[in-house]
Every structure is written in structure tokens, then in C-alpha cells.
Image: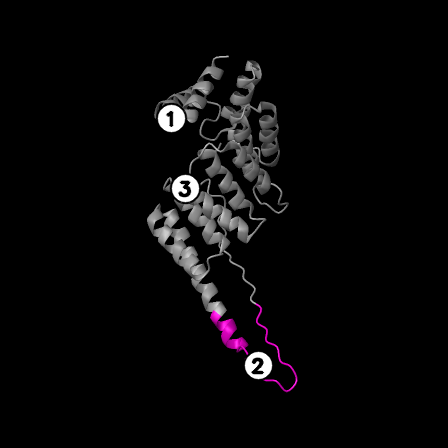
Amino acid sequence: MIKRMNVRYCISVLFVLTMVVSCTSTMTTRTVTPQVDSDNNNSSNSKKDSQVKGHYAHGVSKMREDDYQGAFVEFKKALEIDPKDKDSLNALGLVNHRFGDYTNAKEAFLKAIASDKNFSDAYNNLGITCAVMGQWAESIEAFRNALKNPLYATPDKSYQNLGFSLYRLGKYDDAIKSFRDSLSRNRGNIGSYLGIALCHNAAGRYGEANDALMEGIRLAPEYKGNVQKAQKDFEQKRRSSTGITAQDYANYLEILNY
């Protein structure tokens, strides 16, 4: 399910930064031109890369400790050295999202994507941020762009998130297909079962809604088929949630009675 920022949904922020620096100089016959000392230049670039990696790694460590302010400082330091470092931009976006600064989070994700058009993690995070802002069409586009990369390691998550954005727009059959695409890649994406249940319920297919929800409860490690436990959890979350999410949990409770 599309969730607000937490470490679980921060789709795999990569630790490896790869930079290829090419240093060339040209000389024509009998003409001496200034040359770059390649050894010194390579050493300088290596030091720069190391500094970026260091700040980035420290930032990720602070995120894991829930020190988002500290993480923000580290990612900004990395970007002062290399403003186009895609991983630091993506991570900065996650921190901004955590602070509720969705406009700057969106900007950071877009800059990360500008640095790497195949950066599926950044597309996925952009989609989540757009969804939180209620920009459903933009979120759908972002999730679909994430899925264009054949090397994307976790497409199941973007398929699931895409399903929820389609559901919000009332495209229930398209959403169900996306949820099923997620489950075909990872049967453990319990949120996709819950999403299918919501779609069937909204379309008036109440029996199918109940079947999907019960399957999700059966497979969810937190419930393991315990319907009473799931019901209590849905009731608690409905009371503590606001907006669309609260309505979702109210719908789950209704579906359990079919």
C-alpha cells in the first residue's frame, strides 16, 4: 500500500556511486598547450568521490537512526560537492518527504531522475510523493516510468503503488491488473490483496472483495489468518487515521461482514 515516508518504503537507496572521469588534453605540432596533470586530476576526482560517498553513507546511517535532520545535513554536504549525485538527491527527497515538505521532495526526485533517466527508485519515490499530494495522474506516470526499466530490482512495489493510484481515480479493473502484476512478482505483497479487495468492493463485487481480503489476512504475517486480530487492527487504524486511509479501513471492516 502507498505509505507515507518510512524506512520500509524508502526503496533501496544505493550505496555505490559510480563516476567515470575522462581527462584529455590536446597538442598540435610545435605548439605547447596547457596540460592537465592526469595523476593529480584523477587523485582530486577520487578524493571528491570519496567525500560524496562518505557524506551519503553517513546520511543513510542517520536515517536508519531516525535522525532525519542529521541525514539532511549530510546529503546537502554531498550535493555541495556534486550537485548531480543521483543517490544523494534521491535520499534528500526522502528526507524532505519525511518532513512533510513534499514540494522540495518532488523537486529532489526530479533532479535525481534528470541525472539518470533509468533511476526507477527515484521514479517510485516521486510517484509516492505525488500520490500524497493528491496528484494521482502524475503519480501514475511516475510509477509507469519506474517500470520501464527492465533492470529494476523491485517492480512489485511500483506495480502495487500504481494500483492504488489507479484505484483513487476509479479505474478499478486497471488497478486490479496492476495489483495482480505485483503479486505475480512477489506473493508476499499483502497490500495488493487489500487493494484488490477495495477495488472489487467499489465496483460492487462484494463476494470477490471478501475473498481477496480474507486471502490477504491469511497470508499477512501480522495476522496469519486471525480475522479477529485483523478486525481489531483495522478498527484501531481507522480511528487513528485521517482522510482516504481512514475510509479504506472502514471499507475493510465492511468487507469483513460480507
Residue 238 image point, x, y percent? 39, 23
Q: Dots 1 and 2: beta carbons under 8 Å?
A: no
For the residue marked with disc 2, what is the amino acid?
Answer: Thr
Mark 1 and mark 2: span between their CA atoms?
67 Å
Tag in front: 1 or 2: 2
Kind of residue indicated by mark 1: Thr
Q: Is residue 36 magenta?
A: yes
Horizontally, is 210 left or right of 68 in the view?
right
Query: Mark 1 falls on what kind of element?
Result: loop
Horizontal relation, residue 201 to residue 233: left or right: right
Label 2 belongs to which residue?
Answer: 33
Q: Residue sitting at 46 percent across and 19 percent down?
A: 251
Taking 192 as reference, is 129 above or below it?
A: below
* 33 to 136, vertically: above or below: below
Residue 142 location, quadrant:
top right
Q: Quadrant of residue 236?
A: top left
Q: Which residues are magenta?
A: 22-44
- Residue position for label 1: 242
Q: Is residue 188 visible?
A: no
Between the residue at mark 2 and the residue at mark 3, the CA separation in whole angstroms equals 49 Å
* Among numbered discs 1 and 2, the one appearing first in the sequence: 2
How far is mark 1 from mark 3, CA to CA?
18 Å
- Residue 85 placed where, x, y %? 49, 56
* First in sequence: mark 2 vs mark 3: 2
For label 3, the residue is: 97
Q: Categorize mark 3 by other alpha carbons within 10 Å: few (<14), some (14-19), many (20+).
A: many
Does residue 161 belong to the magenta stretch?
no
Query: Which residue of the protein is positioned furthest toward the top in this rendering?
Result: 258
Q: Amino acid at mark 3?
A: His
Mark 1 and 3 residues: CB-CB less than 8 Å, in contact?
Answer: no
